[in-house]
Image: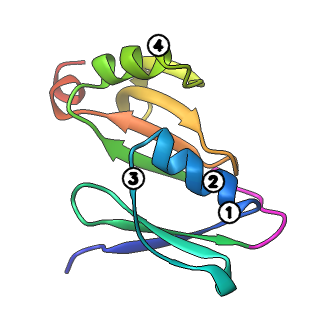
Amino acid sequence: MKFDHLNIPVSDLARSRDWYIITLGLKVEFEIPDRRAVALQDNEGFAIFLQEKGDVVPNGIALWFQVEDVDAIFAEWSARGVAFAHGPQKNFWGYGSELADPAGYLVRLWDVRTMREK
């Protein structure tokens, strides 16, 4: 079994879509304009469906993205103006950084090396 897709409701599809593409580098797999939905895919084939649903309450939902080097990504993305809630640090879930998407979902970045070492 393999986890393959995740649907998350958003209040502003265009804003969320652009954020995931520009900030995280996800690619559009397909869009369904009449349903106000888009499927965005990472480099490994996992897809997140964003579907506009009006007012959205993120309820503490978090998405974890594995990166090559969380410290380097934090420095690179910060330099291009990406706002983080915090930089790489030890957290209850391990070592990594955190930011929020436009709908308020938590996005956590981590890497294998620092997760083991820190």
Mark pair 4, 1: CA separation: 26 Å
Above or below, 82 against 58 in this view is above
Q: Which residues fall within the magenta stretch?
A: 53-60
Contact (Cβ within 8 Å) of mark 4 with mark 1: no
**Residue 6 placement (x, y as % from top left):** 46, 71
Contact (Cβ within 8 Å) of mark 1 with mark 2: yes
Contact (Cβ within 8 Å) of mark 4 with mark 2: no
In terms of sequence position, does the residue under pointer 4 or pointer 3 come before the other? 3
Disc 4 marks which amino acid? Ala
Name the residue carrying label 1.
Answer: 13
**Residue 110 placement (x, y as % from top left):** 32, 34
Mark pair 2, 3: CA separation: 12 Å
Labelled disc at residue 79: 4
Few, some or many residues within 10 Å of mark 1 (<14, 14–19, 20+) = many
User: Helix, strand or loop at disc 4?
Assistant: helix
Disc 2 marks which amino acid? Ser
Disc 3 marks which amino acid? Leu
